[in-house]
Amino acid sequence: MTKQIWLNLPVKNVAKAKDFFWKMGFSFNEQHDTPSSTCMVIGEGNFVVMLFEELLFKSFSQNELTDPNSSSEILISIDAESKEEVDALEEKVKEAGGTVFSPPAESQGWMYGFGFSDLDGHRWNVLHMDFSKLS
């Protein structure tokens, strides 16, 4: 069946998007980089997020792009190891030029997280989940 799954996202400027996520602490598999794309790797499972310049993305999606600043097509969630990591990532987002649309807060008694938009308006959710408090 399938071997791997990854996410493809359109960006206006690959270099600026890469710099934004680099400042947040994400890593890149640069052997897959081209002038119009970069390969970001997230987490222990090495989940791949490919960032493609908008024209290239449109060429293979064969569809118009959604404006992520006015509508949502996806919310990308990242698991954090602790509340402190959530807070640290929020600061890195602000320092790198992202927009926090939902500040760090408790949710449902067992989650702590925040939401942000990257430079291209894609929405991300960072959560620390304490399953021992799940009832």
Image: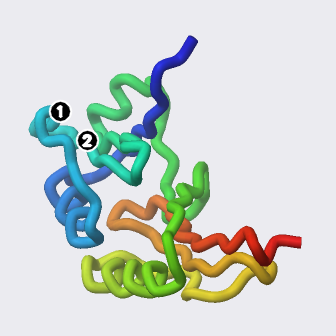
Furthest residue toward front:
132
Q: Which mark is residue 100?
A: none
Residue in the picture at 47% in, 36% down = 64
Distance Cα–Cα, label 2 vs label 1:
6 Å
Q: Which mark is residue 39?
A: 2
Say which of 15 and 49 sits in front. 49
Q: Earlier in the sequence, mark 2 or mark 1?
A: 1
Dot 2 lies on which element?
strand
Residue in the picture at 80% in, 79% down = 108
Pointer 1 local density, CA inside 10 Å: few below 14, some 14–19, many at least 20 = few
Which amino acid type is shown beneath numbered disc 2? Cys
Q: Which x, y percent locates residue 61?
A: 44, 27
Position above or below: 93 against 66: below
Say which of 16 and 87 sits in front. 87
Residue in the picture at 46% in, 86% down = 84
Residue in the picture at 21% in, 48% down = 28
Say which of 106 and 20 sits in front. 106
Assign the C terminus to one quadrant of the image: bottom right
Assign the N terminus to one quadrant of the image: top right
Position above or below: 95 against 118: below
Q: Which mark is residue 32?
A: 1
Which amino acid type is shown beneath numbered disc 1? His
Dot 1 lies on which element?
helix
- From the viewer's perspective, is 66 left or right of 22? right
